[in-house]
Amino acid sequence: MVKQTTIANEITLTGVGLHTGQNVTMTFKPAPVNNGFTFIRIDLEGQPIIEADANYVVNTQRGTNLEKKGVMIQTPEHVLAALVGCDLDNVIIELNASELPIMDGSSKYFVEAIEKVGLEEQEAERKVYVVKDVITYTDESTGSEITVIPSDHYCVTAMVDFGTKVLATQNATMKGIGEFKNEIANCRTFSFLHELESLLNNGLIKGGDLNNAIVYVDKEISTETMENLKKAFNKESISVKENGILDNLTLHYPNEAARHKLLDIVGDLSLIGCRIQGKIIANKPGHFVNTQFAKKMSK
């Protein structure tokens, strides 16, 4: 039997919310046994607590969003993925804003922070749901599907297909949670140019810059769009690399997009509230199908 774990000491990070553009201070704190992952909004009266629970997911537009009694937690998936990836069970996350910091768009900085303070083993045994049957959730409108099948440990395969020349079919596999830190954690979020235009026009991605998202250019860039991008990202010039991404950064892996989708799966499925012993196979995953599957599993 494996014992539950928490962090050995508290640690604080600061950053900016991707969509709100708000500065946010986030502190990880040790938590008692059977606490799970909980968020505390210290900026609000009464410091309300929101559990990382799939049943609090209210929408999945541009990330996973939780709400309990009118209190929001936005885009927690990269932090939750880091907590699971570092083999933690119980952590309190204090925030002074609704949206968690985006950092570089991956889980890397959260993992590094946790590694600095280390883990502490607790007295209680870890609760694990051992998968005995095949369980599936399918989104008929998109063809997205997540299945879990029996396995002797937790592993994940993500298969993505965006149907574009610049980003077509990609696969990524994590054979065990031990691979998360070195193979998955540094894989950054991404967007397509057509999505970026829409987000900019709607006043979103206020905290976005060209250092925390890979931008795949899936259409011709008009002069107007180029000017908007330069203004939004405070750059004098922007160009497109041969591999079809903006020249802001270099891919860590050819399949970084699929690995990031796998990272999102790990974060979203933590909302089940219990460790899973099984093999997750996700075809065209996204926050909606991930969290619907998590709700089904939590039941």
Image: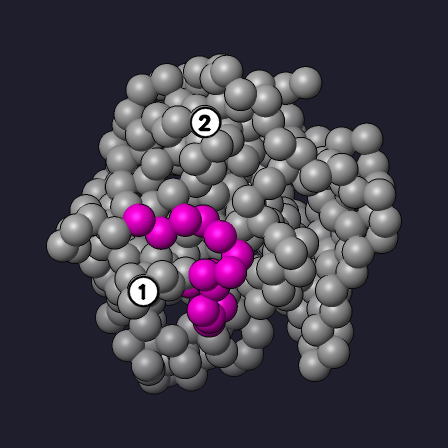
Q: Which residue is nearer to you in this view: 184 or 142?
A: 142
Query: Residue shown at 37%/17% (left/top)?
Result: 8
How packed is label 1: few (under 14 Cα within 10 Å), some, or many (20 or more)?
Answer: few
* Left-right relation of 21 to 39: left
Residue nearest the observer in this picture, 6 or 104: 6
Quadrant of the rendering where the C terminus is positioned: bottom right
Q: Earlier in the sequence, mark 1 or mark 2?
A: 2
Q: Is residue 270 rendered to the left or right of residue 17? A: right
Which image quarter: residue 21? Answer: bottom left
Q: Residue at x 31, y 20 (%)?
A: 9
Placement of 125 over or under 264, stated as above or below: above
Question: Residue 291: where, in percent of width, then height?
Answer: 58, 60
Q: Position of residue 188 (x, y in %)?
A: 49, 49
Residue at 28 percent across and 46 percent down: it is: 40
Q: What is the distance, in whole Å, between disc 1 and disc 2 at their CAs?
A: 25 Å
Q: Amino acid at mark 2?
A: Val
Q: Which residue is mark 1?
A: 69
- Disc 1 is placed on an element classified as loop
**In the figure, is residue 85 to the left or right of 75?**
right
Q: Which residues are magenta?
A: 49-65
Image mark for residue 250: none
Q: Which residue is mark 2?
A: 33
Depth check, front residue: 91 or 216:
91
In this view, 288 is above or below 22: below
Q: Position of residue 137 (x, y in %)?
A: 74, 64
Let me know if residue 59 is in the magenta part.
yes
